[in-house]
Image (tube, rainbow, N blue to C red):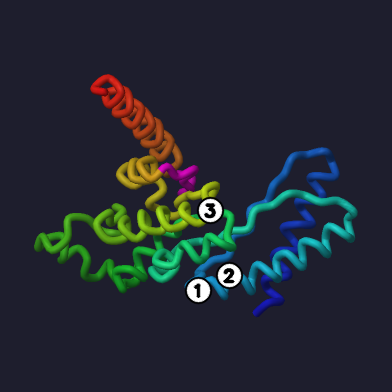
Amino acid sequence: MPEITRMQVRAIFEAACTVAGRKGRVQPEVMIPLVAHVHEFRRQALLVREVAEQVFRERQITVPYLLGTMIELPRAALTADEIAREAQFFSFGTNDLTQTTWGLSRDDSGRFLPHYLEQGLIDDDPFQVLDLGGVGKLMAMAVKLGRETRQDLKLGICGEHGGEPNAVFFCEAQRMNYVSCSPFRVPIARLAAAQAALSERGTMMRTRGTL
C-alpha cells in the first residue's frame, strides 16, 4: 500500500525540514521493514526519494538523510550483499529475526518453551537471550556480506535483545554502531556496551603485547 509509505515519509521529511529551517541539525534515517528481496527495498526506496524531493521543493530546503532496512528475515540476512547495494544501513530486528529463524511465534511460544528449558532441550529462551548459534550466525553473515558490498554500512540491533548483555558483547565483536532497546533496558545496555568495549580494548592490548 504505497500511500502509507508516502504518508509516513512526508511526515518525516516535513518535520525534518521544519527543524532544519530553525537552524537545527537533523539527519533522518528512513528504515524499510520486513524486506526479503532487494526488489522490495528498491521499490520502497523509490517512493521515499520521490516524496523527499517533493517536500524539499515545497519547503525550499534540503536535509541529508539515510535510507536503510531492518534485517528481520533469514533471506534478507542471506542476501545482505545484494540489499547493501541499495541500503545505507541495516538494523537487525532480532525479535522478528528470532521468530522467523526458529519458526516460532513470541505470542504462542510461552506455552511450551518453559518445558523445553526444564527438559534441557534449549539453554535459554531465544526471545530473552540472543541465540548466537543460530540467529547470531545469520547476523554475522549479514554483517560480513553487507560490508563487503558497502564498507561504510551503518549497523545496529533493534529489539529486546538490544538490552541483553550477551547480545551487546556480540554486537561489539561485530563492530556494530549502536544498539536500540526498550527504555527500561537502556541502563543495562549502556553498562554492557562499556564492559564490551573495555574487554575488546584489553584483548587488543594483550595481543599487541604478545606481538
Circle 3 packing at 10 Å, graded few (<14), some (14-19), many (20+), is some
The circle drawn on residue 150 is 3
Q: Single out the residue that lies furthest toward the left.
A: 119
Cβ atoms under marks 3 and 2 closer than 8 Å? no
Residue at the spot of label 1: 37
In front of the other: 188 or 179: 179
Measured Cα–Cα span from mark 3 to mark 2: 16 Å
Residue type at mark 1 is His
Q: Position of residue 185 (x, y in %)?
A: 42, 44
Residue type at mark 2 is Phe
Q: Which residue is found at the position 46% from the left and 63% from the top?
A: 80
Cβ atoms under marks 2 and 1 closer than 8 Å? yes
Q: Secondary structure at mark 2?
A: helix
Nearer the observer, disc 1 or disc 3? 3
Q: Which residues are magenta?
A: 175-184
The circle drawn on residue 41 is 2
